[in-house]
Every structure is written in C-alpha cells, then in structure tokens.
Amino acid sequence: MKTLRQPTLDTFGLGNVLDIFKNGKLPVNADSLVDTIFGDSSNRGAIVISGANGIVGAGKTMQLGSRLQKYNIPIIALDFPGAPDGIGMQYQGLKGSFGQKQADEIMANVIRFNYDGKKLPSQLKDFNPRFLLEAIPEILDIKKNHYKVFRETFPGIAIRSVTSGFPSSELGVGIAHPAFPHQINKMWETVEDTPSDITKLLWAVGLIPVPVSDHWSFVLDVLFCGLMSAGLRYRQASNMPYWKIDKLIRKLLGPNPFRAHDAIGAKGANFLTWSCLYHLSETYGNLFKPTFDLEYRKESGQNWYPLNHFRPVVNWTLSDDELDEMNKWILGPMIQMTSLMLHENRGHLSHINAICEICAQFRSGILATIRQLGTEKSIKLVEEYHKLDPQSASSCWYPEVFEKINDPEWQQLYVNAEHDGSVGLITINRESYNKDVDIELNCAINWLKSENIERVILSGDFHFSTQLVGADTSDFYPALEDADKGYDISLNWSTTARRLHDEFKVSVGFLNGKRCLGGMLELMMHCHYLIATNDCQVGMPEVTLPVIPGMEGCHWSFRKAKKEDWSKISDLLFTGQAVKASGAVGWLIDFAGTEEDAIKMAWKTASGDNHGLTKR
C-alpha cells in the first residue's frame, strides 16, 4: 500500500481509505461501539452532559440526542436550578430539522436534573452513567472538583471536556472540543492518549473528530481568538470602527470576528476569547496578550456592534498603502501563530487547514493561504508586522517551519491518493471544488500515473467531505469583471475532469455523502462509472445562483444517457432540483445501493471483478 500523504482517518485509528473499499465495509460501526461504550440494549448506560443549559451543552445535547436516539441512550442534562433553559430554546430548531414527531422522541430521551455543584442527584445512579461530557464554566478548580465528584460516585466513567482552551494535562481528562455553532457544526477537536471508542463513535454517527495535540487552545481557538486579537490590535493602531475592520477582514480572509462574537453571545464569547488569549500569553508571550478593549468587554459583556447595527453610509475606502498596512496587521500575526502550531505539531496539516475553513469560516485555510503567498512573502509579512508591533517579535516565531512548504503534506491539503499496486484511490476532503482542489487533483492523477496505476476510484475522504456541494463560488468573482477569467476556470476544470475519463482504463466515481451537486457532480460524472448510496442527493442547482454548469454538465451528461432520458437531465439543469441517487440509476447513476453494497460494487468495478454494469 502506498499513499501520497497520511490519510486523515489514520490519525484516529481507522486506517487507509483504500482499505474500506478492499474490505467492502466501514472500519467500525455505531451499533457495536454503542454496545461497547454504553452496554447492550437490555442495560444501556447514560450520557451525562453537565452545564447542559449553556450554549455548548444545549447544542451538544441536541446533536448527540438526535444521532443516538435510535439506541435509546438516556441523555442526562445536568445544570444549576437557576440556569436559563438553553435546551428548551433548541427545540424549535430540532422540530424544524426532524419534524415534531421525531423531535419529541429525541427530547423524550433527554432527562433533566438539577444539582448544587457539590453533590450529584441520588437518582443519577439509576441511569448508570457511562460517559460524562463536561461543559461547565472555564474555571479550572471548579472543573477539577466536578471530575472528582463524578469519579468518586461512578468509578471508571469516561470523561471528556468541551473546554475552549485548557489542555488535557491541566484538566486531567480527555478533550472533545466542539466547534461552533454547537448544534450544527459537526467538528470536534479531540485529545487523548490513544484513539478511543468514543472518538470512533463520533465518526460512526456522522460527526467529524479531529485529533490535535495537547497544547493551550489546540488549533481552532488559536485561529478564531487569534484573528480577533489581530483585529483588535489593528483597531488600536488605526482607530477604525469594529464594523469596518470586520468588513475588511471578511474581504481579506472570509470571517467576521467581531460580528461572530455578537452572534454567539458577546458576554460568553468575549470571556472565552479573553481566557484563551490570556492563557496563551502566559505560555507564549505578547503575541497573544489581550488588548484593553477585550479586557473591558470581558467584564461588561458589551456587544462589538451597536445594538441598532448603525453604520454610516459613507464611501470610505482605504488607499493602497493603508490596505497594505492593514494586511500586515492581520496576516502577520496569523502567519506567526500558524508557525507556532506547526512547530509544536498541533495537528495533521489537512486538519489545521480544514479547521480554519469549516470552523473559523476562512475562505481558504491558513495553510492554503500561506502556500499561495509562498515562503518568502509569508516570512516578510511577519517581519513587517514586527516593525508595527515590536512586542510580538520576541515570542513564538518559527519561520523555519515554512521551509517544508513543498512537501506532500503541504501540497496535498485537500486531495490525497493511495494505491495497492493495482487499484488507485483519489480522495477529496473539501466539500466545494476550487482552484486548490483542481491543482491538487491533477497532482494526484500525475502521481498515480507515475506509479503505473490504470484503475482508479474517485471519492470523498470518509472524514471531512460528508457532502460534495459543488464549486466554490468565490472562485467565480474575478469572472464578473473579466470574461477571460471565467473561460479559464471552465477550460481548466473541464480539462482536469476529462483526465478521469481519458487517462485511466477504468475510473469509478463514488458518492456516499448527503449530496453531490454542481461542479462536484460534473467532476464525478466524467468517470466511466458512477456509483452512489441510495439516499445521496444528486443535482445541478447552478440555475438558482444563477449560472450554468461550467464543467461540461450541460452536454457531458447528455452524451452518457439514452435519448429517451434526456428530459430527466433537462429537469435537473432547468429546475435546479436534486433527486435521490436511487431514482437516477440508468441515466445519471450506474448503481445505487446501501453504503456497504455501494462500497463493494465500487471495488468490483475498479478492480475488474465481474460487476455486471454496462458502461454508458
């Protein structure tokens, strides 16, 4: 078995993705893991979520409750008597997602208990707690006493903290740090000595565990709080209003750090960001030192935007020199903070980059951004930032980490390739296609060709790509002003897609997520065979944007279908409505089945076994 870089699944004990196809099944399943962790169906133990009425606790109660509902696992929501009803506030969202009947069934497994913070309710023993997810306030002594009470009452209970910044070494328990918004975002940063059944269960029920090293604030909060810190320092230097800084950062990188704090809830978010930056500064120095603005709002809980969101209607633009200085204030510290995470090996490079995009809402991950800038320019930006903020120059700056920028781990952030000497596999770990994915996909194809691989499967990575939603529309923006830019995108991306058809003896596109739409579907349909799970939604929603399918969806799909099926393809193109893969067999999809059946069929087809499919 050869791999271009380490598959991200391997970081938490689930091996190579190619093995999933060779073995014809997923490496673990939720049924057996639930029995291992909580006991069999005749004697299920409970999950306890402490601090369950808080933003994090309530969100995770809903997220875990909906995914574990069919296993009848009691979810004990534990909090103080006077805590606001955070769980009740989540009910409408639950009903909107699942309908009232299923929402009520999910809530039926949620049992609420109050406690005084010192001793546990005596009735808790009746539910045989097997797993504690702690989401109480970020005060170290309170957390440690909390764990002590649980361990004394329930010896052997598994404990994970949703801490925003305290490392496992400080807390004495494992970490399962969820990304926000807590009821929607599926990513969890995990810290544990070895990959545990709990982490594997998170993956098996459709969540995204991401192993990170045991350092203060892990990865997500270095990025999220670090960007907030960079914005605040630029505020001190420029006296620019927060909303304007948000607008410029959004244009530069994608997120709105100030608006995000208000949306989460300024009172809690300000404290958590201050806590992360304070502890980071205690360990790493002035680069992370909280500003006066944050110190003040940590205590007051004041919003960053005015309550009426008033912004002057003024055409206020920055000169090129002012914009260049702002870029130094924002990108400089972000690159420096990234050097620290790489120096400490805080995570798989694809993990760090994906956390940046999926959780911190960067348009392109920080590693992809640095890669595009190049080593020399990235280092220069930090050095220029140090001239503006000399105190940051003395702490945690490791420019040598960028010398590895040409290694496969840096160059293949979004696309990986594996092979066993006969069959190759290309996996995409980004939900939307962009120029980076296109470049990396070509590199993966080149590598497989250099290894003399003539049979290939193209698939999501079974980790980050729980769906493939199409092309990244931000890549289209240059085409709004320059038609040649749009032509180049359509030509280059279509040329890449055709390689799947022209340069392999057999190519198989495999769809197993929630949906495969737009540009991603156009890419996949260039494979000789397209295999999917029954419930995967397939479609081309471009007309709703409105654009037209630009990777040959307007004609490649017709070429592969019988004339009598052209009207079905026209419906996809002109309505933008998706259909289930099971309903598209014969004219768009070659085979649809259960996940296990689809995996087995993909392997049979790619490996040359008798699969019984007719090439369209």
Image (cartoon, rainbow, N blue to C red):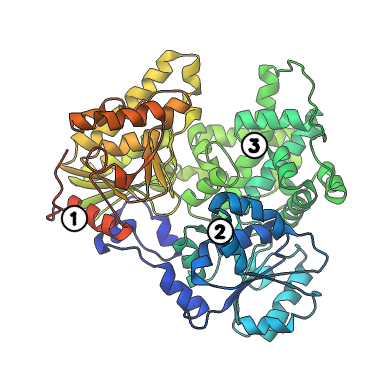
366 or 107, which lies in front? 107
Residue 29 % position (x, y): 40, 67
Q: Is the N terminus in the top left, top right, bottom left or bottom right quadrant?
A: bottom left
Q: Secondary structure at mark 3?
A: helix
Circle 1: residue type: Lys
Q: Do residues under tags 3 and 2 come within 8 Å of each other at their CB atoms?
A: no
The first of marks 3 and 1 along the sequence is 3
Q: Residue at x 55, y 53 (%)?
A: 99
Q: Position of residue 33 (x, y in %)?
A: 45, 72
Kindly indicate the quadrant of the structure image that contains residue 240. top right
> Residue 219 location, x and y as percent?
59, 53
**Residue in view at x 77 percent, y 16 percent:** 314
SS for tag 2?
Answer: helix
Pointer 2 local density, CA inside 10 Å: few below 14, some 14–19, many at least 20? few
Determine which residue is flagged by label 1: 604
State the CA–CA distance, disc 2 to disc 1. 41 Å
Mark before the other along the chain sequence, 2 or 1: 2
On the image, the x and y values in percent for residue 586 come to 22, 41
Q: Is 428 placed left or right of 255 in the picture?
A: left
Tell me the mark number nearer the camera, choosing from 3 and 1.
1
Label 1, residues with CA under 10 Å away: few <14, some 14-19, many ≥20: some
Q: Which mark is residue 101?
A: 2
Q: Residue at x 57, y 39 (%)?
A: 362
Instruction: Answer above or below: position of 179 versus 167.
Output: above
- The residue that mark 3 highlights is 332
